[in-house]
């Protein structure tokens, strides 16, 4: 079997949620078929792309990439959505070089195309539908992060409601030409329930990790250290840390001893409110290897307030044995249990109390650490994705699917 994999994100290095998803998918599909990979590149140097390409060639027959098209907001673009069936982010991020590259790879007649998106239906998926690609799998689609919130101010909520309805119409249209959609949680699947055209069109394929990648000695854990892993290019990450810094941090007893570290691109967000409320906060920016940060932190915090996919940052932290404090929204879609393998808290007071408990209770930290790593091994191992995609490909193609155990 030969597959064309089209990735919204260049999969290597796998340092953020979407890239980890794409990297995991490529590795598992390579156990099932010969892979040709086409990917968009965001904020990477030519040397980084060359190194990533060399690494990915151990799994892929060919690896090709083109720069992504950035999107800049304007009032004119926003107004056009009133008459345009295609959302502005899909319309104005249309990547013609990517589309031409995909068309060239289609000449090799792959048995199926898998597009890994890790976001809302995009210009990449729109291009594949326009090209008439079949059979087509849309991997890791998300709608939840754009679902309007009742707490949003009235005028902004009205705009968000229109954007939501517009996106849903666009999604329903695309799904007519897509054989299988995968989402990462049951919560996301409910958002697609009235958009799909057959009952089995949407399948939950959760985010996974290969625990063999989560071993190594990066030194002892830093006492009183909190980690948040997430690029502020994703607005939900920024809003999460604004809430933590301004609402939660001032309530933590002994906060003057804490180290609070945020990894990921600040994305030109206003960091002043966070620094004013939490003077010892550190923004590392982009890091080439996030493993030492997870391995050495005392606690991973996930104060997410909105979104719909499963949080790879939680699974990653657990894989390193790092205890997690999360909001319930932050842990949506994960098969976690409060007080057993994670601490869940939704108010500033509850969140602060959970952080305090973990800082002072060694036995609690150890219990959550052991249970979290066991949960990843049992529920979120890479073999789960492999098995589900083996079944998906057997269903939508006539080519023989031959898996391996390596």
Image (cartoon, rainbow, N blue to C red):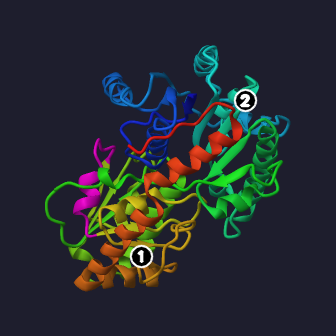
- Residue 154 horizontal side relative to residue 239, left or right: right
Of badges 2 and 1, nearer the viewer stands 2
**Neighbourhood count class around disc 2 (C-alpha, 10 Å): few under 14, some 14–19, many 20 upward:** some
Which sits earlier in the primary sequence, circle 2 or circle 1? 2
- Local SS, label 1: loop
Viewer-side residue, 153 vs 375 = 375
Q: Quadrant of the C terminus?
A: top left
Q: Is residue 222 left or right of residue 103?
A: left
Q: Which residues are magenta?
A: 285-298
Residue 134 - label: 2
Which residue in the protein does label 1 denote?
342
Residue 211 position by quadrant: bottom left
Judging depth in this view, the residue of 76 and 373 nearest the camera is 373
Residue at screen point 74% across, 64% down: 154
Q: Quadrant of the N terminus?
A: top right
Quarter holding residue 117? top right
Choose top left, top right, bottom left or bottom right for residue 125: top right
> Does 378 sit above or below residue 4?
below
Residue 169 is a magenta residue: no
Contact, CB < 8 Å: mark 2 with mark 1? Answer: no
Residue 286 painted magenta? yes
Q: Secondary structure at mark 2?
A: loop
């Amino acid at each position: 079997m030969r597959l064309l994999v089209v990735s919204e994100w260049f999969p290597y290095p796998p340092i953020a949620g979407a890239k980890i998803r794409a990297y995991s998918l490529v590795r598992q599909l390579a156990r099932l078929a010969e892979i040709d990979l086409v990917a968009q590149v965001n904020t990477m140097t030519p040397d980084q792309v060359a190194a990533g390409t060399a690494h990915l060639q151990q799994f892929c027959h060919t690896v090709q990439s083109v720069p992504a098209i950035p999107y800049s907001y304007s009032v004119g673009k926003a107004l056009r959505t009133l008459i345009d069936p295609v959302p502005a982010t899909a319309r104005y991020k249309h990547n013609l070089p990517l589309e031409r590259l995909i068309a060239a790879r289609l000449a090799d007649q792959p048995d199926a195309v898998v597009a890994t998106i890790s976001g809302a239906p995009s210009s990449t998926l729109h291009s594949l539908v326009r090209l008439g690609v079949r059979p087509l799998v849309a991997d890791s689609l998300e709608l939840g992060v754009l679902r309007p919130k009742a707490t949003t101010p009235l005028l902004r909520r009205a705009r968000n409601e229109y954007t939501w309805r517009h996106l849903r119409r666009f999604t329903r249209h695309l799904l007519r030409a897509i054989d299988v959609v995968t989402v990462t949680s049951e919560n996301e699947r409910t958002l697609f329930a009235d958009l799909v055209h057959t009952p089995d069109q949407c399948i939950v394929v959760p985010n996974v990790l290969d625990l063999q990648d989560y071993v190594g000695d990066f030194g002892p854990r830093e006492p009183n250290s909190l980690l948040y892993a997430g690029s502020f290019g994703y607005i939900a990450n920024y809003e999460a840390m604004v809430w933590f810094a301004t609402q939660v941090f001032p309530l933590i007893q002994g906060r003057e001893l804490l180290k609070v570290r945020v990894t990921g691109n600040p994305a030109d967000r206003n960091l002043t409110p966070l620094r004013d409320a939490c003077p010892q906060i550190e923004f590392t920016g982009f890091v080439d290897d996030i493993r030492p940060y997870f391995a050495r932190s005392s606690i991973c915090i996930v104060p997410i307030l909105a979104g719909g996919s499963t949080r790879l940052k939680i699974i990653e932290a657990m894989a390193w044995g790092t205890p997690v404090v999360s909001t319930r929204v932050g842990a949506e879609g994960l098969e976690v249990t409060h007080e057993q393998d994670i601490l869940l808290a939704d108010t500033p007071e509850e969140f602060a109390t959970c952080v305090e408990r973990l800082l002072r209770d060694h036995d609690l930290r150890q219990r959550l650490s052991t249970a979290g790593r066991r949960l990843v091994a049992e529920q979120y191992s890479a073999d789960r994705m492999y098995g589900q995609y083996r079944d998906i490909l057997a269903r939508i193609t006539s080519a023989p699917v031959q898996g391996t155990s390596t």
